[in-house]
Structure formats: C-alpha cells, structure tokens
Amino acid sequence: MNIKIVTDSTCDIPSEFVDKLGISVVPLYVTLNGRSYLDMKELSRDSFYAALPTAHPHPTTAAPSPGQFMQVYDQLVDKGAEAIFSIHISETLSAVFTSAQTATAQYKRVPVYAIDSGNLSMALGLIVLAAAEEAMRSGSVEAVYEALQRAIPRTHAYAKLDTIDYLLKGGRITHIQHNIIGLLGIKPILKMNNHVSRMEIARTKSKGFERVVRVAKENLPKAVKFGITHANARSQVEKLLEILRAEFPGLAEPLINEVNPALGAHVGPGALCFNWISGD
C-alpha cells in the first residue's frame, strides 16, 4: 500500500530526509515585524534569527487551517497515496494537531490518521522519521501505527534555554514567573516526553549546558535515533559533539538542525536541545 506521511514545520527534520522519504511538511504561520510568513517556505531560519532581537512587536505564530491540510492530502492522493498519517506537534503546545484532526475527520478520499506526537522540534521529527521508514519498508497501515505507538512514549526532548524573555513575550510563562526566575538568575531547562512537559532549573548558562551533556551521555548508549537542535547556537552544537565523540568513539553522525522560526519565537536564541528515541 502507498502510505504517505504528513507533518508540520515544527518538526526540524533536515531537508535531505524530508526529500528522501517523501514527507510532506505543512508550514505554520509566523508574523514578524507586522508581516505574515509561511514558516520555512517564506521565512528562513537565518532571516528569522537575524531579525528576532529587534523584532517589534514580538513574533507570533498560528496553525495552518484544516483546509490547508486537506489541500496537502489531496495532492498526495492525486499522486497515488492510499492512506496518510498526519503527525504533529503536541496538542499541549499548539493548535496544529486540532486543525489536522478537524481536517482528517472531514477527509473522505482515503483514510487519514491524525497523530499527536506528544512532542516538539526534532523529537517530533524522529517520530515522523520512524513512521516514514516503516511506511516505506512495509506499506502496512497497521505496522506504521504500531511503530508510532512504540516510538511516541520512548521519544524525549531535553533543552536548555539561555533566556526566558521569549517565553514571556510568547505568553508561555507569566510576568510573575518571569520575575521570580529572573530575580534568582536561574536558567530553565525544558524536557518533554509522551505529551508531558516539565521544567528543571540550572544556576547558570554553563550549568545548563553541562546538564544537556550529562543527559546525552546517559541516553546515547540506549538510543535508537538521536539528533540535536539549536537556536542560533552552532558553537554549542560543535562543543557538545566534541565531548560526545571523545566519550563515544565511532559515534554515528547525528541529525542536526536549527530550530524553526515557529518555535524559535518562543525559545529564543541560544537554546540547545538533545532529542532521542530510547530503545528500552
């Protein structure tokens, strides 16, 4: 069976894998300096991060409409798709999944399955890759669904942020939380797994980086897929890789990508995230 995979632009999958596996990526909207852009189609990562520090008002994001999802489904069916999995950023973080769910409920040409990944960024991307690889390998709806059910609870994102200002501007924390965290001078660490997000704290930027290193070292030996995402922080990625390669000679080349504008508007520059699927 010809099964196709659809996701959204928060997935941070490197473009070569999107092309190789025939994954369709539906863009979110990002409003920057008063103009609305299609995330990653009309607004590149480089352009976004160059404009972010002086952007006014703060960038905002919006989900694609159900009609946009249905248009993508139509394009795939016109090319021979017999079933579609539409896999998206966690419903707890965005309205994207709700929009896709509305679209799949209305779509009648072929079966379309809306899947809440329970995650974000490349953690979502790793789940999407697992589904796309299974679809290509087996061509079985049941096998793809089972692959997703295995991957989702085992997929993790662990990210340190250099600033909390963008969480406040994006409405992700309150002024009171921002003031308390700022007063204490601590740095947030965000982690997500299986629909649940939590926050840890680190005393300094360097301590936050050390936490990411520790988590990566602890989980790499049992990871079946892993990747690194960052927000305009390439030097931190290079430092992390140097440490991991010294610890694990022969380390497989990880997936690496910069955080998309739709998420970058909330995490701000300097974020570093280790993403993995555990083999446990």
Image (cartoon, helix red, strand yellow):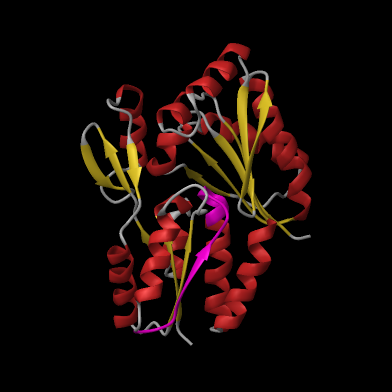
Residue 85 pos. (x, y %)? 47, 72
Q: Looking at the image, is 179 positioned above or below residue 31?
A: above
Q: Which of the two residues, 243 or 273, is positioned nearer the viewer here?
A: 273
Q: Position of residue 61 (x, y in %)?
A: 34, 43
Residue drawn 41% across and 33% down?
A: 170
**Quarter residue 182 falls in:** top right
Task: State left or right for residue 43 relative to residue 200.
Answer: left
50 with respect to 113 (left or right): left
Instruction: Name the residue nearer the viewer: 190 or 39.
Output: 190
Q: Residue at x 49, y 27 (%)?
A: 174
Furthest-left residue in this view: 35
Q: Which is nearer the eye, 229 or 11? A: 11
- Residue drawn at point x = 72 percent, y = 50 percent: 250
Q: Please check the rendered image and state whether residue 114 is part of the magenta-colored stretch, yes or no.
A: yes
Q: Residue 171 appears at what percent x and percent y?
A: 43, 33
Q: For residue 97: magenta?
A: no
Percent x, y of residue 185: 61, 14
In this picture, residue 80 sits left or right of residue 242:
left
The answer to whether residue 249 is visible is no
Q: Quadrant of the C terminus?
A: bottom right
Q: Could you tell me if residue 136 is visible in this image?
A: yes
Looking at the image, residue 277 lies above or below residue 55: below
Residue in view at x 69 percent, y 23 percent: 207
Nearer-the-camera pick, 211 or 64: 64
Which residue is farthest top?
A: 183
Residue stretch in magenta: 109-124
